[in-house]
Image (cartoon, helix red, strand yellow):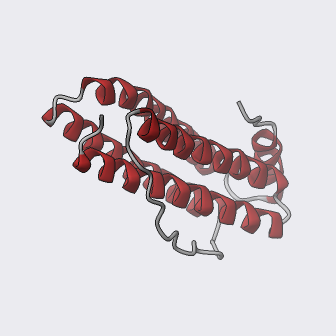
Amino acid sequence: MLSKSLQDAINEQINLELSSAYVYLSMSAHFEGENLGGFANWMRVQYQEENGHAMKFFKYVYDRGGKVHLKVISQPAAKFKTPLDVFNLVLEHEQNVTASINKLYELAVKEKDYASQSFLQWFINEQVEEEKNATDIINMLKMIGTTPISLMMADRQLGARKNN
């Protein structure tokens, strides 16, 4: 059974994951409006991943005899600047998610909840991948610049991303 403090912290994480999904969906809408369908696709796949993460936490709470308490999700930004600016926001956002998961893990260690430590290890590994993906795209965008042809090439590459 989950402790009250760990259940509450996981409920906060569920909210963060759902909020993350909403942010990525808003970024997808922005890119659609900019006629960058590949960038929009990348963000929609990210939206689906974040929803999946929320549902893993959701199921885990019930598997451990807890209760999920959903909270309000704030409206995300709707306007963004350049693709590079957007991916800098993505990296910053993922770093915040990483910090939140690390705090959850620290709480599980403090409470000697070995099952939660094991469960959270997957998310710790996932966050390494999330931050690397964002960093790789940032580096690519810095390298190619903002000419229309370079953005078209990046758009095509990002459009190839599939949902796992």
In the displayed orientation, state which residue is furthest to the front.
Answer: 65
Q: Is residue 30 above or below residue 5?
A: below
- List x then y, in percent, for residue 30: 73, 68
Q: Is residue 164 above or below residue 102?
A: above
Q: Is residue 144 visible?
A: no
- List x then y, in percent, for residue 57: 47, 41
| Image quarter (top left, top right, bottom left or bottom right) of the C terminus | top right
Q: Is residue 8 visible?
A: yes
Q: Is residue 45 above or below residue 86?
A: above
**Residue at image point 43% right, 33% down:** 123
Q: Is residue 72 left or right of residue 31?
A: left
> Quadrant location of residue 34?
bottom right
| Image quarter (top left, top right, bottom left or bottom right) of the N terminus | top left
> Quadrant location of residue 92?
bottom left
Q: Is residue 35 left or right of residue 64?
A: right
Q: Out of 118 and 146, give the one closest to the viewer.
A: 118
**Residue at image point 56% right, 48% down:** 138
**Residue at image point 68% right, 60% down:** 25
**Residue at image point 43% right, 28% down:** 125
Q: Is residue 164 left or right of residue 14?
A: right
Q: Out of 11 and 20, give the one closest to the viewer.
A: 11
- List x then y, in percent, for residue 67: 41, 49
- List x then y, in percent, for residue 53: 54, 41
Q: Is residue 53 left or right of residue 159?
A: left
